[in-house]
Image (spheres, helix red, strand yellow):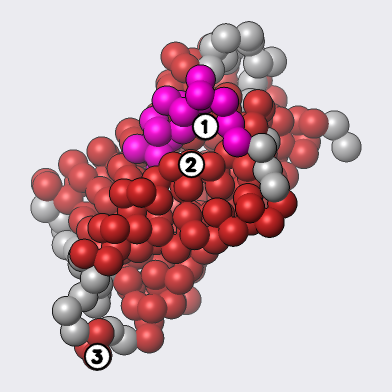
Amino acid sequence: MDETTKGWLNGFVGVAIFSGSLPATRVAVQDFDPVFVTVARAAIAGLLALAVLLALRVPRPSMRDLGSLVLVALGIVVGFPLFSAMALRTITSAHSLVFIGLLPLATALFGTVRGGERPSPAFWGFAILGAAGVAGFALSQDLTASLGADLLMLAAIIACGFGYAEGAGLARRLGDWQLICWVLVVSLPVSLPLCVVLQPADWSGIGWPAWLGLGYVAVFSMLVGFVFWYRGLALGGIAAVGQLQLLQPFLGLMLAAALLGEAVTWPMLAVTVLVVACVAGAKRHAAPRAQA
């Protein structure tokens, strides 16, 4: 199996794990404050990452990588979790998930700027078509949300795309799972104290679904999923493997249907077929990675 194929397989596993993030966050913020969910997921994952790094005696990254680690943390540890959790206080998980269809374009754009990649025009055509399909699906749904929540989701997408692209280059130097571990550890001096300060005054009102939601986003969304995802981006290319994110809204909607009782409609299935075709086309026309 060549590196590109391995990259796509790892990327798909990462996307499958991430697909449960927004439904799980939606459940968690019903009982927890969104800011607490953001810092708690980072703190829990950071402590687990620190334990792994110490147990395996992983060498520390160089000082030249510190700035990039902070930028990645701002995107995927702070930006996306915080903005999406705030949005999910007022919109459904189904509404939030369709915004994820814009994430491949954001990742590809930042990959072009930060990663030195130059995808072909055909690649961009498939990427834009896939994003347009997801946007059309969003507009066709009978979903209501405030403008503020929609803007928060757009901010979350921008932050996440930047963090993905910035982290992919580091993953080639530090290693895929080592990267996300170091990003979480760099965040610990902020996330852990804030987790203590912002903890709920009364824990008795927290239901078990909220605990399960917090546990999922802390262990899987914040740590395990990124191990596969950054490995995929590093092996297969930021822009190319990033198109797998087009599948995430629909995988997430299927989970939301099972966990939250939301209906899976035929328009969703129709757009899923279009998105899969766009992912296949983007993969075929993705150009080899250029040197930054």
Outermost residue toward the bottom? 204
How far is the residue under mark 1 from the one under mark 3?
A: 39 Å
State the extent of the magenta-drawn residues as a range.
60-77
How far is the residue under mark 2 from the one under mark 1?
A: 9 Å
Q: Is residue 284 left or right of residue 139?
A: right
Whichever of labels 3 and 2 marks the residue nearer the N terminus, that label is 2
Circle 2 SS class: helix
**Dominant secondary structure, magenta:** helix
Above or below residue 33? Residue 1 is: above
Q: Amino acid at mark 3?
A: Ser
| Quadrant containing the N terminus in the rendered view | top right
Q: Which mark is residue 167?
A: 1
User: Pointer 3: what residue?
Assistant: 204
Q: Are marks 1 and 3 in contact (CB under 8 Å)?
A: no
> Alpha-carbon neighbours of circle 1 within 10 Å: few (<14), some, or many (≥20)?
many
Q: Amino acid at mark 1?
A: Gly
Circle 3 SS class: helix
Q: Amino acid at mark 2?
A: Val
**Residue at image point 39% right, 46% down:** 187
> Alpha-carbon neighbours of circle 2 within 10 Å: few (<14), some, or many (≥20)?
many
Whichever of labels 1 and 3 marks the residue nearer the N terminus, that label is 1
Q: Position of residue 174 (x, y in %)?
A: 64, 32
Q: Position of residue 130 (x, y in %)?
A: 47, 35
